[in-house]
Image: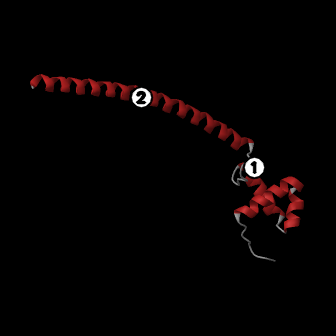
Amino acid sequence: MAGNRQYDHEYKVQAVKLAKEIGQAKAAKELGVPRNTMYGWVHANRLGNLDLGAGSQTPQSAMTLNEELLRLRQQVKELEKEIRLLKKENDFLEEASAFFAASRLKSAKTKE
């Protein structure tokens, strides 16, 4: 009997994808992986602990992605509001700067 074999993440991902296509027992047999190991990987995927990459989200992780999307949209709205405020403040400062520069220039001319 072989000892505990370590499988890399990519191997597990491919194994789970195969198991979803042809069934867990058949995939385990074809790959020479113990059934319990295959079942563990599939279970880990269902719980969200084994990410298969893009396009393979579980309902739980999809909900999390939706929540993140909503949070990010709210953050964008807040940042856009802050940008508008900063632009207004910048415009005001530019006008104030131009006013003071003009008054300084006028003051310098009258002193001559």
Locate residue 16: give its quadrant.
bottom right
Where the C terminus falls, by quadrant? top left
Q: Is residue 108 left or right of residue 32?
A: left
Numbered disc 1: secondary structure = helix
Q: CA distance from mark 1 to mark 2?
A: 47 Å
Callout 2, which amino acid? Lys
Q: Position of residue 79 (x, y in %)?
A: 49, 33
At horizontal 72% and vertical 49% (from top left) the residue drawn is 54
Of 23 and 17, the residue lying toward us: 17
Q: Position of residue 102 (x, y in %)?
A: 23, 24
The label number, if any, that marks residue 64 in the structure image: none
Callout 1, which amino acid? Arg
Pointer 2 residue: 87
Of 35 and 67, the residue lying toward us: 67
Q: Is residue 9 left or right of residue 26?
A: left
Neighbours of disc 1 within 10 Å: few (<14), some (14-19), many (20+): some
Numbered disc 2: secondary structure = helix
Residue 63 drawn above or below residue 36: above
Q: Position of residue 26 (x, y in %)?
A: 90, 61
Pointer 1 residue: 46
What's the image's color scheme?
A: secondary structure
At horizontal 66% and vertical 40% (from top left) the residue drawn is 65
Of 53 and 43, the residue lying toward us: 53
Where the N terminus falls, by quadrant? bottom right
